């Protein structure tokens, strides 16, 4: 599970710090998210700083800050992202957007925080097909606020479709 009632069910400041470091990178990165993910962000964090923010929604009347771009699909969001000449593009949620991104031909890497705990959840991260992705790297297990977790990076391999 990755969410419960449009919130993250754990409190791991080190994970948020890692997320920020990875998605900011050299400051020329794009983050793409669905509407619910956008709405779940704390007001003080909107838009995510030092990243070009794109929100996917079919609601053309969605009110967003002027520096945030609205896209009606993942493909449109990716086109808008590429127009920024980014170093990297990250899809940061939610479940539907993750699922679409993981199955998209352009997805070549997945960053996951694996938490060794049970949580109440109503939103799940999609299945990662081991025929398409393999774990490339993992941090040592870490502990914070009573939770044990690990940062993992999964890399796309040549899958059944013959894509690299």
Image (tube, helix red, strand yellow):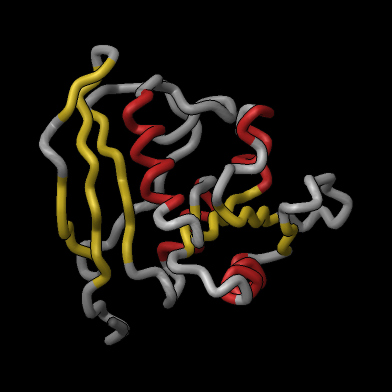
Residue in the picture at 50% in, 60% down: 29
In x, y percent, where is residue 7? 54, 26
Q: Vertical placement of 111 versus 159: above or below?
A: above
Residue in the picture at 58% in, 43% down: 49
Q: Is residue 144 left or right of residue 99?
A: left
Residue furthest to the left in view is 140
Residue furthest to the right in view is 61
Q: Is residue 15 left or right of residue 136?
A: right
Task: Indicate the quadrant containing the C terminus: top left, top right, bottom left or bottom right.
Answer: bottom left
In x, y percent, where is residue 63? 84, 45
Q: Vertical placement of 8 versus 20: above or below?
A: above
Image quadrant in which you'd find residue 57: bottom right
Residue in the picture at 11% in, 37% down: 140
Q: Vertical placement of 82 versus 29: above or below?
A: below
Image quadrant in which you'd find residue 156: bottom left
The foreground one among 95 and 135 is: 135
The foreground one among 61 and 65 is: 65
Task: Indicate the quadrant containing the N terminus: top left, top right, bottom left or bottom right.
Answer: top left
The foreground one among 128 and 69 is: 69
Q: Is residue 130 left or right of residue 6?
A: left
Residue furthest to the bottom in view is 162
In x, y percent, where is residue 73? 66, 66
Circle count: 0
Residue furthest to the front in view is 26
Residue in the picture at 25% in, 37% down: 114
In x, y percent, where is residue 37? 60, 41
């Amino acid at each position: 599970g990755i969410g419960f009632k449009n919130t993250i069910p754990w409190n791991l400041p080190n994970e948020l710090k890692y997320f920020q470091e990875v998605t900011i990178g050299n400051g020329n990165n794009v983050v793409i998210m669905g509407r619910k993910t956008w709405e779940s962000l704390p007001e003080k964090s909107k838009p995510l700083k030092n990243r070009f923010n794109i929100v996917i929604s079919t609601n053309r009347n969605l009110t967003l800050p002027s520096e945030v771009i609205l896209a009606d699909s993942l493909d449109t969001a990716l086109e808008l992202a590429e127009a920024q000449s980014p170093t990297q593009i990250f899809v940061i949620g939610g479940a539907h957007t993750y699922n679409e991104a993981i199955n998209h031909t352009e997805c070549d890497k997945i960053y996951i925080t694996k938490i060794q705990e049970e949580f109440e959840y109503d939103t799940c991260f999609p299945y990662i097909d081991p025929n398409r992705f393999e774990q490339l790297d993992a941090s040592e297990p870490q502990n914070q606020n009573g939770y044990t977790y690990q940062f993992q990076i999964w890399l796309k391999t040549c899958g059944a479709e013959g894509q690299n």
